[in-house]
Amino acid sequence: SYDFRKLNEAEKYHSKFKDLYRQGLNIDQNYVGRAYSIAAVYYFRLGNKRKALQLINEGLSIAPGNYELQTRKRMIN
């Protein structure tokens, strides 16, 4: 939804994920990293660096070893 600039829909799905996610769930970290990365890029392109970093850090709390999120964090800082 972020790719298609459907912010309300994207935020709805992000909120649902956060409500349903719990530690120990077997989720591929690449999917988590990709989803949070896309969201971060959306906000970064709008000039909202703070929100982009917040999303990257949130994604890293779920998928700490995710290369894509780690790389994006280094690029933004």
Image (tube, grey):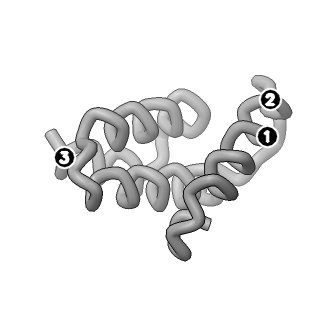
Which quarter of the rendering shows the N terminus? bottom right
Q: Furthest-top residue in view?
A: 23
48 left or right, relative to 68? left
The location of residue 63, given as percent across then percent down, is: 57, 39
Q: Quadrant of residue 45?
A: bottom left
Q: Residue at x 27, y 44 (%)?
A: 48
Instruction: Quickly name the residue at label 3.
Output: 76
The location of residue 27, given as percent across then percent down, is: 76, 47
Which quarter of the rendering shows the C terminus? top left
Which one is nearer the viewer's eye here, 32 or 6? 6
Question: Contact (CB < 8 A) between labels 1 and 2?
Answer: yes
Residues packed near mark 2 inside 10 Å, few (<14), some (14 to 19) or many (20 plus): few
Q: Quadrant of residue 31?
A: bottom right
Instruction: Quickly name the residue at label 2.
Output: 19
Badge 3 amino acid: Ile
For the residues marked 1 and 2, what is the alpha-carbon distance in whole angstroms?
A: 5 Å
Decide which of tag 1 and tag 3 comes sooner along the chain: 1
Instruction: Quickly name the residue at label 1.
Output: 16
Disc 2, SS: helix
